[in-house]
Image: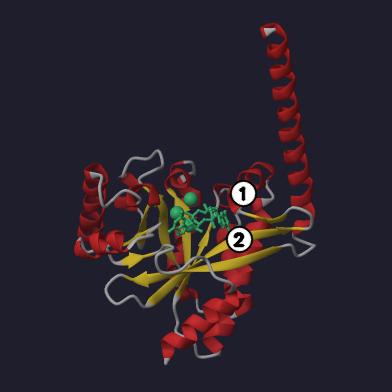
Amino acid sequence: SSKESGRNRYNFYSASMNQKALMRMETEAGLRNALERREFYVEFQPIMNAADSTVVAAEALVRWNHPTRGRIPPDQFIDLAEETGLVVPLGEWVLRTVCSRIKTWSDAGLPLIRFSVNVSSRQIERQDFAEIVRNALRESGANSAQLEIELTESCLIRHSDTNISDLFGLKEWGVSFAIDDFGTGYSSLGYIKTLPIDHIKIDRSFVRDISTDFHDQAIVEAIIAMSQRLGIRNIAEGVETIEQVRFLQERGCEEIQGYYFHRPLSAEALEELLRAQEN
Ligand code: C2E
Ligand code: MG
Ligand code: MG
Ligand code: MG
């Protein structure tokens, strides 16, 4: 009967909700030990100069190699790491890992490209965040001009002026700043007027249908034009096809990141790519 199938459906849903809650608890418990068990690692996605397709930067993207579930993408654990505060030690670990790579690769004579690190709101709300970055730079001996911090728009509006000006004090050290997922956050454009932003990353949701959707074309053209007038370099994210590349090149997009050129790479694969570029 329909009553019975209704009950079955209810049981099914409640079972799957329990499953979800269990999964979440298991993920959270696992996250707590993952750092000391060395289950995290960092991949690097190359960012290309749009004009000549050379690698000018790489974005550091964290991955979790779970002992039983295998490789878990950040979309499945970063939110939880933020809620639990675990993103603070995790973020510091990513930062230190990237700084030590910057140092070894520059010592090895590889091209001095920029390395960007995603930073979460929870990290910035800590008063000692800028200090953590300075320590990571100092202790690794990394060239601070090679380090970029990626922030989201919501991250900027959520914080006090003191925190933000402290954070941007890192500019004096040569650290640069990018706005990630530009155009998707809740924000006025006000911060662009007042903060020394170096790069705007055009969110991939605007890039995806750029060859066919005239709304997306208008938005991307406007972001490129605005960033150029303001002297902020622009980066298009999520570029997967040659049509997207051509559209962006013709509109004066400066840097391109996406599967069309490279997926996120292991440190070894990036090193090989940089070596090949040098010769
Ligand atoms: P994000 O910072 O916007 O990073 C770009 C994401 O887009 C990456 O996903 C990358 O693999 C993916 N991507 C790049 N090119 C393409 C493309 O052509 N097509 C498609 N479909 N996707 C592309 P990933 O690595 O899964 O990271 C997801 C998000 O997790 C990141 O988005 C970032 O918000 C967060 N995240 C990653 N690493 C860290 C970290 O160390 N700390 C913090 N706080 N967040 C991180
Ligand atoms: Mg990013
Ligand atoms: Mg992004
Ligand atoms: Mg994102």
* Distance from mark 1 CB to nearest ligand 1 atom below 8 Å: yes
Classify mark 2: helix, strand or loop.
strand
Q: Is residue 34 left or right of residue 165?
A: right
Please name whichever residue, 14 or 122, is drawn nearer the observer in this view of the structure: 14
The structure residue drawn at horizontal position 78% and vertical position 50%, both measured from the top left corner, is 30
- Where does residue 135 sit, x and y in percent of width and height? 61, 70
Number of residues whose C-alpha sits closer than 10 Å to that of mark 2, classed few (under 14), some (14–19) or many (20 or more) = many
| Quadrant showing the C terminus | bottom left
Q: Is residue 194 left or right of residue 230?
A: right
Q: Quadrant of residue 141?
A: bottom right
* Distance from mark 2 CB to nearest ligand 1 atom below 8 Å: yes
Q: Amino acid at mark 2?
A: Val
Residue 251 in sight here: yes
| Quadrant showing the N terminus | top right
Q: Is residue 112 above or below residue 28?
A: below
Number of residues whose C-alpha sits closer than 10 Å to that of mark 1, classed few (under 14), some (14–19) or many (20 or more) = some
- Where does residue 260 sit, x and y in percent of width and height? 40, 65
Q: Quadrant of residue 213?
A: top left
- Where does residue 222 sit, x and y in percent of width and height? 22, 50
Q: Is residue 97 above or below residue 161?
A: below
Q: Which residue bears the numbered disc 2?
A: 62
Please name whichever residue, 213 or 250, is drawn nearer the observer in this view of the structure: 213
Classify mark 1: helix, strand or loop.
helix
Please name whichever residue, 128 or 206, is drawn nearer the observer in this view of the structure: 206
Q: Which residue bears the numbered disc 1?
A: 78
Q: Amino acid at mark 1?
A: Ile
How far is the residue under mark 2 from the one under mark 1? 9 Å
The structure residue drawn at horizontal position 48% and vertical position 46%, both measured from the top left corner, is 155
Q: Quadrant of residue 70?
A: bottom right
Please name whichever residue, 237 or 96, is drawn nearer the observer in this view of the structure: 237
The structure residue drawn at horizontal position 61% and vertical position 49%, both measured from the top left corner, is 78
